Image (tube, rainbow, N blue to C red):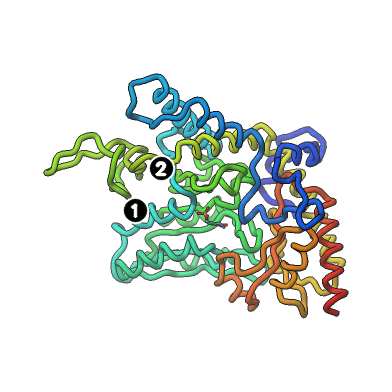
Amino acid sequence: MVTAAMKQVKMKTASPASSLDPYRIKQDFPVLQQQSNGRPLVYLDSANTSQKPQCVIDAINKFYAHDNANIHRGVYDLSIRATKAYENARGTIAKFVGASRPEEIIFVRGTTEAINLVAQTFVRNRVGQGDEILVTAMEHHSNIVPWQIVCQQTGAVLKVAPINDAGEIILDAYREKLTAKTKFVAMTHVSNALGTVNPIAKMIELAHEKDIPVLVDGAQAAPHIPINVSELGCDFYTVSSHKMFGPTGVGALYGRLDLLNAMPPYQGGGDMILSVTFEHTTYNEVPYKFEAGTPHIAGAIGFAAAAQYILDIGFDKLIAYEHELLDYATKSLATIPEVRMIGTAAEKVSVLSFVLDGVHPHDVGTILDQQGIAIRTGHHCAQPIMDRFDVPATIRASLAIYNTKEDIDALAASLKNVMEVFR
Ligand code: PMP
């Protein structure tokens, strides 16, 4: 399975198919150097949250050990250093997502907060009774519920673009759903439950042909696919640090500067103002207008260290290796007759979501845990996808650059053991 992004990068590079050394990469991640239930830990739950390399841990430690102070307020050296580190982090994230200016990056708690911010400060003011907000059938709950809330507040209607049995968007049906009533489109770049990579460039283009603004949920794309919001031309793009080797509790919203400038603040408080009297408040400029209160300063710094870690490895190597690993894993699971893969898109990254005929996913999770293998079982915060495929839950193994073929072999061997018990 080769995605369009992979083909693009492959064309750009002359290096051999895969020169990333996952054993070397694994050494960067202290948490992976341990045993779980008496076996070497096999971590296959990176779509849930990824592990953190030493450089990210060091960046956070260094901040607290040497530079900790509040930002944007102090006149003293420490505060100036902390402010610089925080604003440099914004610059790194801007570079990571291909934003043309750091002001287009708002630090938030993660993708969930980013989507809620856009829902309440952009979309809510632009929709009314009978207007439509379009999502796809493969969204995470955090790209469904904020829109349902806006619909309840305004009388707008949530529409859903369908997917086919492989878990791919049906482009013709999507096109048909873009009507004069559609006021906003929100879509995931990569599905967390299926691994599908959406053709977002085409989907954005189709929406923009009708002047409909678009938000892309990039939570699952960021650690696997190079993002260039300027080339994509999307209006909003969201990422979560913890999915891309950074700390939890921080993420970024990219927004087009003209849109951000025109939007009202999301929350009120310190730092988002220029002046306050009891009669009137003047808001700060973008991005500070959207960052009320003391932000997760160390988090932003760790987040930037994680983004830089990925950029230093290089997406060309990363994509080639992950493609090879996903292919290996897909073939390996196909040797188990009871495995039924949910999500078989031609354009896919990092996720193997499946059911084992005759065994409840939670039982599989528990048995695998006893063998040191961490996978996720459940609905993956995407219940509509489970309904679409008529399963209550799936077993999901999700891959990252620190996973090796041995990890996959351990998974396949354990699944075979499970089937011997249940057959
Ligand atoms: N969207 C997708 C596709 C996700 O996978 C997730 C996390 N599982 C989210 C949104 C929510 O991200 P967060 O919990 O970091 O806010």
- Decide if ligand 1 comes within 8 Å of the CB at mark 2: no
| Observer-nearest of 189 and 43 | 43
Query: Where is residue 420 drawn, in percent x and y?
Result: 88, 74
- Ligand 1 occupies quarter: bottom right
- Identify residue for label 2: 256
At 69% from the left and 58% from the top, the residue drawn is: 351
- Identify residue for label 1: 122
Q: Earlier in the sequence, mark 2 or mark 1?
A: 1
Residue furthest front as drawn: 38
At 76% from the left and 58% from the top, the residue drawn is: 373
* Number of on-image labels: 2
Is 252 displayed left or right of 269 in the figure? right
Is 305 displayed left or right of 182 in the figure? right
Q: Residues within 10 Å of mark 1 (few under 14, many from 20)?
A: some
Q: CA distance from mark 2 to mark 1?
A: 12 Å
Mark 1 element type? helix
- Kind of residue sitting beneath label 1: Phe
At 52% from the left and 28% from the top, the residue drawn is: 65
Say which quadrant the N terminus sits in.
bottom right
Query: Where is residue 141 drawn, in percent x and y?
Result: 50, 64
